[in-house]
Image (cartoon, rainbow, N blue to C red):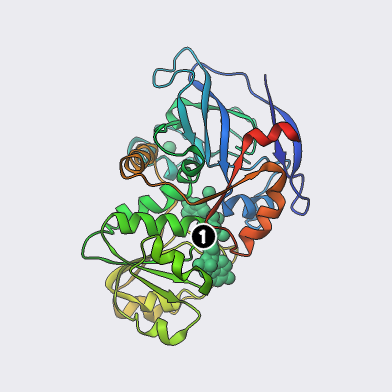
Amino acid sequence: MTQSQGWASQSATTPLAPFRFSRRDPRENDVAVDIQFCGVCHSDIHFVRNEWGNAVYPVVPGHEIVGRVSAVGSAVSRFKPGDLVGVGVIIDSCRTCPSCRAGEEQYCDVGATLTYGVPDRYGDITQGGYSNNILVDQHFVHTVSDKLNAAGVAPLLCAGITTYSPLRHWQAGRNKKVGVVGLGGLGHMALKFAHAFGAHVVQFTTSEAKIDDAKRLGADEVVLSKDPEAMKKQTGSFDFILDTVSAPHDINPYLESLKRDATHAQVGLPDQPPVINMGHLLFRRRNLSGSIIGGMKETQEMLDYCAEKNITADVEVIPIQQINEAFERVVKADVKYRFVIDMASLERS
Ligand code: NAP
Ligand code: ZN
Ligand code: ZN
C-alpha cells in the first residue's frame, strides 16, 4: 500500500481536517505522482457539503492536480520519474464504449471514474488531490509544460478544460458574439479562452467590483446581470453563451439574449433546477445544452495550447491550513480567481 496524507471531510457539516489513509498498490499502468499544487473547484464544495446528494465520507477532495512523477509501473511508456504532470476530474473509464473510443471519456456510457468520492473498478473509494500523492493510470495523466507557473496550471485541469471544450465545440471564435456568465474559477478561464479564440466576449457578472478585472482578462463588454435594462439591450444578439454560475439563478434573460438557432450551454451545476420559459426556446429555435469537463485528448490539446499562448489561471496560493476559510470565500464569490493549495504546507499539519 501507498501511505498518503491529506485533508478530508468526515460529513456534510464538519470542516476539512488532517487525514491519513492508504492508497492501493501501484499497478503496471500506474503513474505515481507527488502532488505539488491542487486547485479548489466549487465542485469540491458542492460534493463535500453533499449539495448534489451523492457524497461519501471520509472524502479527500481535489481534482485540479499538478505534480512530479515519482515512479512508474512496468507498462508505462509516456512518463518517467521527474516529469511534471497533471491529473483532472476523471481517472478511469470503460475504454470500450463509443464515447471512450471517440476520446470523449467524460461521457463514458458506463460512467467515468471520478478522481474522488466514487468506487473505482476494483471497489476502492477514490480520494483526491488535497493530499501528498496519487496513483493514476497513464491514460488519465497529462504532460504539463515546465514553461508555465505550476500553481497557475493546476486549475486548467478542471476549470480550464471545462470551458475550453464547449467553447471549441460551439466554435466560439472570430465574428462570434460570446457571453460568459459568472466571473469565478470557470468564468475567468472561459473569458481568457474566448478572447484568445478571437470572439467578441461579453462578461455577465453580479459583482460590480469585478468589472475592471473582466476587462483586463479580455472582456470586450461587461454587463451587470442585476440590471434589467442592461440585460434587455442584449436581446437576440449572442451566438453562444456559456453559463458557469454555481448557484440557482434565472437563466431566462440569457435565453432571450441568444440569436436564432444559438446555444446557451450550462457548465455550472447548481443544486436546484432552473425554471425555463419555453417561449424563449420556441420563438427563435434556440438551444439549451450542457457540457462536462473534456476528454483526455482534448485536455492535452488545451494544456499545449496554454503553453503556446502563455495562458494560466489567476490564482491565490494558500496553505492547506486555510482551506475551510477558502471554501467560505468561494461561496461568497470572493476569490481572484482560483484558490490553489500549495501541498508543501501539508507537512505542517
Ligand atoms: P466559482 O469560482 O464559485 O464561480 C461561480 C461564479 O458564479 C461566482 O464567482 C459568481 O460570479 C457567480 N455567482 C455565484 N453565486 C451567484 C448567484 N447566486 N447568482 C448569480 N451568479 C452567481 O465556481 P467554479 O469553480 O467556477 O464552478 C462553477 C460551477 O461549475 C459550479 O457549480 C461547479 O460545480 C460547476 N463545475 C462544472 C464542471 C463541468 O464539468 N460542467 C466542472 C467544474 C465545475 P460573479 O461574481 O461574476 O457574479
Ligand atoms: Zn472542478
Ligand atoms: Zn466508456
For disc 1, the neighbor class at 10 Å (few under 14, some 14 to 19, many from 20) is: many
Instruction: Find residue 140 and report its image quarter.
Output: top left
Q: Which residue is drawn at 45% across and 33% down?
A: 94
Q: Residue at x 58, y 54 (%)?
A: 42
Image coords of residue 290 (percent x, y): 42, 59
Asked whether, in this view, residue 175 is left or right of residue 289, the answer is left
Query: Looking at the picture, how far across and down is residue 132, in whole percent?
Result: 64, 30
> Ligand 3 lies in which image quarter?
top left
- Choose top left, top right, bottom left or bottom right for residue 233: bottom left
From the viewer's perspective, tell me whether residue 105 is left or right of residue 73. left
Question: Which structural element holds mark 1?
Answer: loop
The residue positioned 47% from the left and 61% from the top of the image is 244
Q: Which of 280 and 322 is in front in this view?
A: 322
Q: Where is residue 147 in the image (x, y as percent from the top left)?
A: 39, 34
- Residue at the far top: name it: 74
Q: In the figure, 31 relative to 253: above or below?
A: above
Identify the residue under disc 1. 184
